[in-house]
Every structure is written in C-alpha cells, then in structure tokens.
Image (cartoon, grey):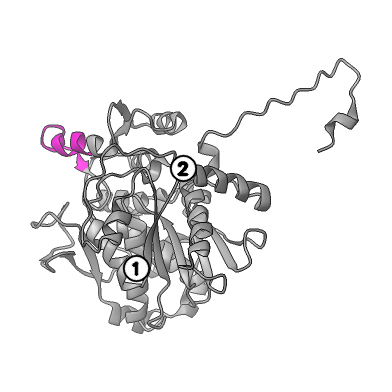
Amino acid sequence: MNLHLENWKNYVTHLECSKTGNRYPHSEVIGLSDNNAPILVKYDLASISKELTKEDLKLRGENLWRYSELLPVKNHENVVSLGENFTPLIPTPNLGKGELFIKDEGRLPTGSFKARGLCMAISMAKELNIKRVAIPTNGNAGAAMAAYAKRAGMSSYVFCPDDTPEINIREIAMQGAHTWSVNGLITDCGKIVREGVEEMNWFDVSTLKEPYRIEGKKTMGLELADQMNWKLPDVIIYPTGGGTGLIGMVKAFNELEEMGWIDSKRPRMVAVQSTGCAPIVKAYDEGNEAAEFWENAETVAAGIRVPAAVGDFLILKGIRETNGFASAVTDESIISAREIVAEKEGLLLCPEGAATYAAYLQEIQSGRISEKESVVLFNCATGLKYPMPKVNNFIDCKSKIDYSSLRA
C-alpha cells in the first residue's frame, strides 16, 4: 500500500476544546478538555492549500493515508496500518427512483468503519509512547482497537455489554485483547474504563474522549468528496451512536472549503437512530443543544445503542449547520431494510447500515428527502458479523431428486 512516505509533512498547529476554544499542545497525551469536552485537532489549512493540490492526490495510493497533510501523525514511522484502502461507493438502481449510493465501509480492516478511527488513535498512541489502551465497545470498535494495538505492540483491554454479538466478542479476544463481557450497556463499560485509568495505567480510547479517532473518521468525508470529484451529495444518511463519523465528516467538509477545494454547499447530514435508543432524535425534535440519557436502551442494531454520547452537542450542531435532521426507525424496519437490500442489490448490510435505508424509505414518504436528491447511505460494517435467518432447505442426495420442487 503506497503511503507516499517520502513526502510526509505535518501541519497540525494545536488542539482545541470543542466548547471553549481553549488551546492545548499537540505533543502531549490528552483526553477530554478541562471543560470535560471533546478536543479537536487544528491544522494550518492555508499552508496545506498552497503546497498540496488535487492533482498531487491522484499520484498517491487510494487509501486513508492519502490525506496525510490533514491527519495528525507527525512521524510516518508511527503509522499503524492494516491496509485501509478506499471503500466502494456503490450505486443502487434497484432500491429507489433517485440517485442513491451505498458507501460500504465493511470492506475495511476488521470489517468496519471503526478501523478508520482506531488506526489513527493507535498511531497517535504510538507516537505519544502509550503502551496500554482500553475501550468500551458494542463490538466493532473493540475489534478494531484490538487489531491495531496488537499490530503496534500495545496491550489492550476491551469491555463489551454481555449481549454484544458473540462473533464480535470472539473476534476481539482472538486478536489479542484482554476481553470481558459486562452485565450492562456501553455506558457501564465506559465507567469501568474511566474508573480504571489510575489503577491500570491504561489510556481511555472511548469515543471522543481523545482527539484522534475523529481524525480517522473524517477521512470518510475526504474520501467521499474525492470519489465524487469534489462535488458532494445532497444528503448523507449516517447511523449514529457516538456520532464520531458524522462530526468528523462535517469537520472534513469545513476544512476542504477553507482550503478552497469545495464550495459552501453541504450535504444535509441525517443522523439515524433506533426508536429503542434515540437520544439524538429526541434532542433534535425538542430543539435542545444536548441530549438526555436514554433509559432502557434496546435495539437489534447494537452499534447505535448508545444511550448517552459525550459529543451529543457536536452531533446536533453538525445536523443543524447542514440543514439536516435526525430520524428514528423501528427494529422491524431495520430488519426489513436489510432483507430488501440483500435481495435487490446483493449487498449484505449490517443492522446499523440497514437502518440508513430504513430511514431513507421513511423520509422519502415523509417528504423530508426528495427522490430528486442525491443520497449516500453509510453501511458501517460487513453484514457477515451478524446473525442471519436459518436456511432449512435440505436435499437427500441418496434419493431420487424431484427437480420440479426446486423451482422458485
């Protein structure tokens, strides 16, 4: 994989509190800001725009590190990579009358978009000489952290709700993480990680509790703009739990505009949640700037079962700044959407990805999305990690076969 190491140059100016704008140095280990808010990485975008062109990018490999000038790693020797190549942007002519695409993030290492954020967080942990990391997870983030931490020679600790899909828990353990199931939600797992920092001397890599996962996730926006020849779609529908990817894409688009690479037109960002866990949707509908804790969270889409997001105010800000909205869909519609996409397009989505198509159908009906708009759905993980309906058809090869019975 071509990482253009000979041209590596870093443009980070400082870190910044997302609430107050207070500045922090880039060279120190840091979690949340002094105001207990997520920290954002800031770049010298004026210099990047003078020294990097779109034509330069075309000479580089189609992978996440193609955008190194807009990423935080200073020394290329600290890059921890498992092959983060571009994910396909797939047209879906059989799913709707409009211009509808699926960005299939399931093609990334460890089978999910979590690879983007965790490869960046672990690369920066390596740069900052961190040796032990810990994370709460509903599955895919833990798998990604385990893989990248093992690659980097770090020890990792992962805590999963006990109803996390079994394949995820086994995947995490097999990739070398110290792995535990917890009789609670991801917020309970997060509490274990947070309260263990001092005694265990691990670094907390929870969603938005360090500055760098968002920088990896923002490459979804950079890559999408690149694939669409720097003309963004009208709407992006994104499955939203912790919301790092939505926040990251908004950040990416803002940086690209400041560099003069795109205009001020933004995709309307649509955050999708399940009706069984919809704190962002409730906050959006009520006009609030932050979300309330969602009691008794439950959904088949485990990845978006996040009852409280530390970056809730940033998610809501991103939605409103782009004239987007938040949408809640039922578990029944998620299951149905997954079956429809598999049958009509041959694409096996994860439940969270299927939620985006369920939301698309729902909002086409409501009128909040028009069939005339170009829409990108994000499928955040391979559907192969999740339970599927049993197949009960059986043939006895030792008996005469009635082929007429095989006709559909």
Q: Amino acid at mark 2?
A: Asp
Eyeballing the image, is 41 above or below 179? below
The earlier-in-sequence mark between 1 and 2 is 1
For mark 2, give the secondary structure: helix
**Residue 81: percent from left, percent from top:** 41, 51
**Residue 208: percent from left, percent from top:** 25, 53
Q: Which residue appears at 36% of the width and 58% of the height?
A: 245
Residue 233 seen in the current view: yes
Q: Amino acid at mark 1?
A: Val
Q: What main secondary structure does the magenta stretch of the protein show?
A: helix
Tell me whether the residue at label 1 lies in contact with that at label 2, contact meaning CB atoms closer than 8 angstroms.
no
Split into 4 quadrants, where in the image is the C terminus? Answer: top right
Q: Which residue appears at 39% of the width and 66% of the height?
A: 269
Res 324 → quadrant = bottom left
Is residue 196 a member of the stretch shown in magenta? yes
Residue indicated by mark 1: 250
Residue indicated by mark 2: 331
Segment colored magenta: 190-203
Side (left or right) of 404 relative to 246: right
**Residue 338: percent from left, percent from top:** 56, 46
